[in-house]
Image (cartoon, coloured by chain):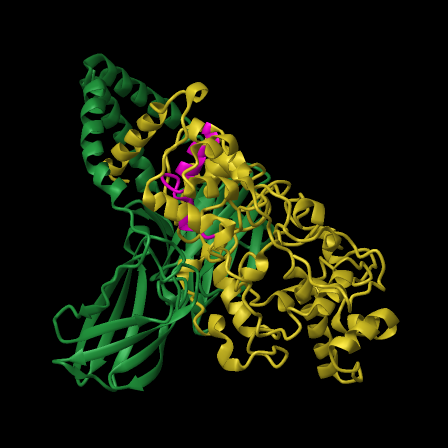
Chain colours: A yellow, B green
Amino acid sequence: MSLFVRKALVVVMVATTMLPNPSFAEALSWIEAEIGMLRSLALGSLPPLPDDVTNLVADDPRAAAFGQQLFFDPRLSATGGVSCSSCHQPERRFTDGLDKGQGIGQSKRNTPSIVGVAYSPWLYWDGRRDSLWSQALSPLEDAAEHGGNRLQYARFIESTPEYREQYETLFDPLPDLADPDNIDRVFANVGKTIAAYERLLMPGRARFDDYVDAVIANDTNAQQALFSPDEERGLKLYIGAANCTQCHNGPLFTNNEFHNTGVLSYAGDVPERGRIAGVREVLSTQFNCRSNFSDAAKRECAELDFARSGYEVMGAFRTPSLRNLENTAPYMHKGQLKTLAAVLQHYNDAPLAMIGHNEAKPLELSNRELQQLEAFLNTLAAPLATADRWLSPPSSSFTNYGSEEQQR
Amino acid sequence: MARISYIVLVSLLLWSVPQQIWAHGGVVEEEDLCVIKVNYLRGHFKIYQPLIDGHREYCEDLPNATETVFVMEYLHDSLGAAAVDFRIIRDVTGKGRFARWEDVAEVDDLDSATVFYREPTIDPDLLTVVHDFKEEGDFIGIVTANVDGDQKIYRAVFPFEVGFTGLGYWPFFIALLIAIQVQYLVMSGKFKRWRQRGNLVALLFIMPLLWSGKTVAESQTEWQSARGVYTVTVTSSLEPIEINQMHSWTLHITADGEPVSDAVLAVEGGMPKHDHGLPTRPRITEELGEGDYQLGGMRFHMRGDWEVSIEIKAAGKTDTVVVMLTL
C-alpha cells in the first residue's frame, strides 16, 4: 500500500474521531453520490424477480405449494430423517448454525441462506449449479446429505397418492420408471417444484431501508430516530472506507459473483479451489441450462455461454447477501469465522490467500470503526417478506394449493 | 539511537544468511517467492500451519508438529497436465539438509519411512495436501511429476525440519528492533512532525476524491483506438448500465469513416484499481453488418472505474480501443 493511501486512511480515521460526541450528535449528512449509493442498496431498488426460463413451473403457485411439502419432507432421504429443512431451517434464515451442514453425514460446506437466492445466476458457494432446481437435486443424491437416489425419489412420488396427484397436475402423467430417461425427468421435475417454493423466500424491509427513505426525504429527525450515531457511521464506512460495496452491493447486498478473500482453510482440509472448480462442474453437469431437462432454449443460456474461469477465480467463493445476518453464524464457506466481529477483523487484515490471490486489501480501520460497521450490519435484520405459512412445514399435505394466491 | 538500531539490523541480516545458504534443496527463495523446482518445472511453494499460525507462510522449516498444509501453485503448464504425487519421509538418509534424490533412492524401505503419501493426481492448477505431523524431527519432502505418461519423471527433493528452533530468536530481535525504532522516533520528535505533515498532504489529495463521486456511466460513446486506426461507437442494450445485470453492447466500427467488416475482435476488461477482470467472458456473438458487431455477455459487478479493451483485427491492421466507464 502506497504511503499516500496510508496517509489518506490516517486522515479518515482522525476525521472520524473528530465527529461530534454521540450525546449531542446531529444526523450525518450525505453527499449526492452517497445518497445514490444508499438508494442502490435499499430494498426499493430490487427489480422484479427475473423469470427462470429453465423452469416452466417456476412461478406456478401450485408448484410452490408442492415444493414446500417436498422441502420439509424427510422421506426424501435414504434414512427418512433428512429433509431440505434439516439444514435450511426457516427460524435461522434457512441456515443451521453449524460450520458445515449435517445430513446423514457432514456436508463439505457451510449451509448458505436461501433467502433471495432466486436472484442469483449461480448456486452454491462455488456456483457449480446454474439454476435453483438443479441445485435442489444435488443434496438429494449426496451421500453425506439426503443420501438417496433419483429412482427412489421417482418411486416415492409414484407411490404417494397426494404427491402423485400434484405432480400429474403440474406435469405429464407419471411415466414408466423402467426407462432411465423418465427417472431423470421425474427427478428434475421434483427439483423444479422445490425451486418454485424457494423463489418465494425474500428478505423484508429492514430498518436500514427506512433510514434510506429518511435520507432521501432529507428528514434528519427520522434519520436520528432510526439509526444511532454508531449505525450511521458504520453505514458511512460501509459505502466508503471499508470497501464493502465492491462486492456486497445492490439491494441484496451481494453481486452474486465470486471473489477470493483469503479465508483460512478449515481444520483438516486443504484450501478449497472454489469457483475454478465450480465453473468446470457447472459446464458439464447433467442438469445445467443447456441440458434436455432444462426448459430453456439452448441460446438462452447466457450465463453458461459467458462464464469466466481461469486462475483469477482460484479460491473464489460466491458473495453472500448481508441482509438477514441474524441467526446465520458461523460465516464463510466452511463456517471458519464464528462471529461478525471476526469477519470484519478478517477483512481489516486482508491476509495473503493460501491459494490464488486475495482481492481484498487491508483496511486499517480502528476497532471502534469495526464495531460501528457491525452495528450497521445489524440494521439489516428483518423478518422475511414471505408470508408465515411458507416458513414452516405445510400443516397438511392436502393443502388447498389450487385456489390460493401466491403470497410474498 | 539510530546507530544502535542499524547495528541490530545488520547483525540480524548477517545472522539470517546461513539459513539462505542451507535452503538449497528443491525449494528456494527467489525474490520473496518460495519456489519449488521439479527439474525445470517450477511451482510457487507455500506451507501453512493454520491451526497455530493462521495465514503465516513458511517455505521449508516448520516451527510446530501440527496440522500442516502444503500448497504448490504451478508456474508451468506441464505440471498441470502431469500426474503429481507427494511424499514425506522421516530423514533416514543421515544427510540432513544435504539430502538429494540419490540419497533417498538408496533407502531400502521407503514405505516404512513414509509418514505421508498422496497418490499421483492430475490437477490443472495446483497441488494441495494436508498432513498432521505427530512429532518433531527432520523430514524430506519428495514431489514427483510424471510428465507425458511414463516418458519423463521429474522430482523435487526438499529436506526440512519440523519443530525447528532456528526462528526462536526472531520474535525477540524484531520486538527489540521495533522498540528501539519507536523510542528513537518519539524521543527525536520525528513522529510528531511526520504525523502533522503527512496528514496535511493526505488531506490535500483526498479532498478532490471526496467530491468526484459519479453515479452514472459516462456519456461518451465514441472511442478512438490507440494508434488511431479505428473508431468504435458503443451502444449498450442496458441504458444506463447497472451493475450485476447481463447485457450486450453493439459496437459500430469504422476506419477512415468507412464501416469495417470481417473484423476479428478480442475483448478483455477489468477494474485497474482492483486488479481483477470482468466477472464474465464477453465475446462477439454476431456480426450485424454495416460495421456493427454484437458483443454479448457484458456484466459489471462493482461500482467504480472500469476499462474494456477491444482488440480489432481487420484487413491486416490490428489496433486496440480502450473503453472507459464509471459506474
The image shows residue B155, relative to residue B6, as above or below, that is below
**Quick one: B84 or B305, which is closer to the camera?**
B305
* On-image quarter of the C terminus of chain B: bottom left
Residue at image location 28% in from the left, 30% down from the top: A11
Residue A328 figure quarter:
top right
In percent of width and height, residue A95 lies at: 66, 48
Residue A295 in the image: x percent, y percent? 61, 78
The residue positioned farthest toward the top in the image shown: B187
**Residue A104 picture location, percent across and down:** 76, 55
Q: Is residue B86 above or below residue A6?
A: below
Looking at the image, can residue A198 be seen? yes
Q: Nearer the viewer, residue B121 or A268?
A: A268
Could one spot residue B64 in this view of the protein? no
Residue in view at x 69 percent, y 73 percent: A188
In the depicted view, which residue is nearer to us: B303 or A337?
Answer: B303
Q: Would residue B92 be counted in the magenta stretch?
A: no
Residue in the picture at 28% in, 55% down: B272
Q: Is residue A55 above or below residue A83?
A: below
**Left or right: where does residue B11 sit relative to residue A220?**
left
Residue name at image x 33 percent, y 20 percent: B176
Q: Is residue B199 left or right of residue A42?
A: left
Looking at the image, residue A298 lies above or below residue A197: below
Q: Which residues are magenta?
A: A229-250
Image quadrant where one finds the N terminus of chain B: top left
Callout count: 0
| Percent position of residue B195, x then y | 23, 23
Q: Nearer the viewer, residue A117 or B177?
A: A117
